[in-house]
Amino acid sequence: MNSSLFIREDVAAALQAGRPVVALESTVIAHGLPRPQNLETALAMEAAVRAEGAIPATIAILEGRLVAGLSSEQLATFATTDGIVKVSRAHLAAVRAAKQTGATTVAATMLIAARAGIRVFATGGIGGVHRGAELSFDISADLPEIARTPVAVVCAGAKAILDLPRTLELLETLGVPVVGYGTNQFPAFYVADSGLPLQARVDAPAEAARLMQVHWEMELPSGIVFCNPPPAASALGKQEVDEWIAEALQSAAAAGIRGKAVTPYLLDHLAKASRGQTLKTNIALLVHNARVAAQIAKAYSALKSA
């Protein structure tokens, strides 16, 4: 703990003892899910991490202070308060200087997790290259962050509304290992198989931990993306999701939706078009990723202490 970073007591004790810790993001609570599912999911993710023998550390910014490990009361505040700032790497200094409270994206969560000494992070899906990025240059800050921050990210691939082939291509260019967890295919968030093959695969926490160890022993600076498909019972079909996305894109264009407003518009359209199915899948994969991340963190801790 220092003046700029507060690490919750049980998280700090686990890190000092070499026990497994899993970072979780706060944007999914403040911006990603509707109420009351946002708080229910945040608590379920933390419970899944604890059930696997690891310590959860939900990361956020409180009145300008970086925090690794929100309390249950703070989680409830993030889930019920309007106007919480969404914070990526580019916004960290401004939010801290203004002593604001902010919810951290994948990029900001990874950065703070690395500062705290946390090596494993669970989220839903990473950001990526947006459709039409050749004109808009709209590329998520998640990708360069993963390329420079040594944290393993357990996710269900990238969000289905993105340009997935270009997202994978950019990750390869940036030197980021994208590894299937029990799969040879890149998941597309709601969909287990995007149709895009992966070059690397692991099938168990110990294999993932060994890959992490070798990657960082080679002094490679990047994180690692472990692609964990959504649970089979909750995964949606590729064709129906593609159709919903096509409809959502047409609707957004007709309504003149542009820039940062596009993603929430598309996700809201998908939720309505699917009659809530995408929301159920989102929640299921978030908890599933938290559970797998805890298993990987536990295996990595055991490997480091051996």
Image (cartoon, rainbow, N blue to C red):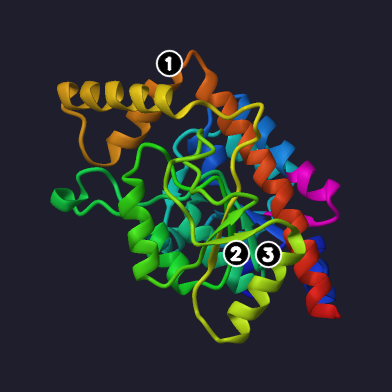
Does any portion of residue 223 appear in the rendered image? yes
| Sequence-first tag of 3 and 1 | 3
Q: Is residue 50 magenta?
A: yes
Q: Are marks 3 and 1 in contact (CB under 8 Å)?
A: no
Look at the image and give the residue range highlighted in magenta. Answer: 46-57
Quadrant hosting residue 305: bottom right
Name the residue beneath numbered marker 3.
208
User: For the residues marked 3 and 1, what is the alpha-carbon distance in whole angstroms?
Assistant: 37 Å
Q: Which percent across, then down, holds residue 115?
A: 59, 73
Q: Residue furthest left?
A: 135
Name the residue beneath numbered marker 1.
272
- Residue 115, placed above or below residue 86: below
- Residue 286, placed above or below residue 24: above
User: For the residues marked 2 and 3, what is the alpha-carbon distance in whole angstroms?
Assistant: 9 Å
Q: Are marks 1 and 2 in contact (CB under 8 Å)?
A: no
- Residue 230, placed above or below residue 55: above
Name the residue beneath numbered marker 2.
152
Q: Is residue 131 left or right of residue 4?
A: left
Q: Are marks 2 and 3 in contact (CB under 8 Å)?
A: yes
| Sequence-first tag of 1 and 2 | 2
Q: Quadrant of the N terminus?
A: bottom right
Query: What is the three-letter code of the residue carrying label 1?
Result: Lys
What residue appears at the point 43 percent right and 42 percent down from the top-left corner? 195
Q: Which marked residue is nearer to the observer: mark 2 or mark 3?
A: 3
Q: Is residue 120 left or right of residue 267?
A: right
Q: Which percent across, then down, holds residue 45?
A: 71, 42
